[in-house]
Image (tube, grey):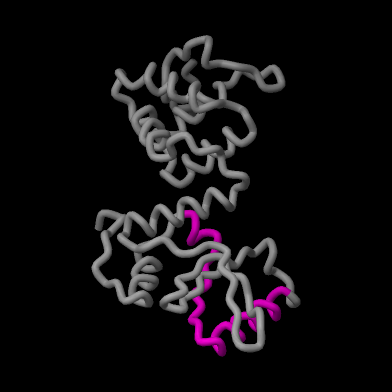
Amino acid sequence: RCRKGMVVHTGSIPVAEITEHYSIPTTTPARTLLDLGAVASDAVLELAVESALRKRQTSISRLRHLVDKHSARGRRGPSRLGALLDSRGVLPPTESHLETRFACFLRALSKAGLPPPARQHSISDRDGFVARVDFAYPQSRLALQVLSFEFHSGRESWLKDVRQFDRLIRAGWSVLPLTEEDLHEPPMALLRDIGRRLGIHDLFDIDGG
C-alpha cells in the first residue's frame, strides 16, 4: 500500500516468497537476498549470502531457482545475485564474517593482476619462531597483517603488535597492516601499494577508473 513518506520499490510479491517473523509478514531470506542485489555493493551482497548459507536460512538451489524465475523481468537484483552465485561455484559457505572478507580481499588481488599470497604463513629467524602472519609473499619478504579492532583494542595487544612488527622488520621483512575494512572493499591505492612492494606496477583498475 502507498503511505505518505514511503517509497514502494516492488508491487505484488508471490506468496511463496513471503514468510512471517514474530507475526510480521516479511520476504523470505532468499527473496531478501534477491532484492538486496539491486541496491547493495558486491561486498555487502556476498557477506549477506554467505551469512544466510552458513545459518542454513536458504540454499544455493533456492537462490538459483529464484534468480531463474525473476531474470526474465530485467531487474538488477537477479542478474547480480546470479553473477555472485556463478563466481562462488559450489564451495561450502565461509565459516565466519571475517573469513568472507578474506575471500573478498583475495579476489580483489586477483582482479588487479596480483599473485595470491600465502595464508597463515609462519616466519622464523636464526633465533627461532618470529610470528605467524595472515598473508605473506615470502620471496619478497612482505607480510600483510590484519589488525582487528575487536582483538587489538587494548594496550597489551597494541604492545604485542609493536614488538612483533619490530621482530619482523629486524628479520628482514616489511609489514603492511590491513584493517577489516581493507579486506571488505580493498581500494586501488592499497592494491597499488602491494604491487609496488612486489615490483608489479601495471595493475588492472578494479574500480573501473
Locate residue 190, reporting x and y percent.
Answer: 40, 68
Residue 161 drawn above or below residue 65:
below
Locate residue 134, reporting x and y percent.
Answer: 56, 65
Query: As rendered, which of 162 and 170 lies closer to the eye?
Result: 170
Residue 137 highlighted magenta (yes or no)? no
Figure disc tally? 0
Residue 141 drawn above or below residue 50:
below
Give the quadrant of residue 58: top right
Query: As rendered, which of 91 and 150 lies closer to the eye?
Result: 91
> Which region is colored magenta?
157-184
Residue 173 highlighted magenta (yes or no)? yes
Name the residue furthest top: 15
Task: Name the dominant secondary structure of the magenta segment.
Answer: helix
Q: Residue at x 58, y 21 (%)?
A: 26
In the image, is 3 to the left or to the right of 157? left
In the image, is 120 to the left or to the right of 109? right
Q: Residue at x 51, y 78 (%)?
A: 175
Q: Residue at x 38, y 35 (%)?
A: 86
Which image quarter holds the C terminus? bottom left
Locate residue 81, reporting x and y percent.
Answer: 41, 32
Q: Residue at x 59, y 48 (%)?
A: 97
Residue 64 drawn above or below residue 197:
above
Query: As rendered, which of 49 and 22 lies closer to the eye?
Result: 49
Locate residue 17, reporting x and y percent.
Answer: 52, 16
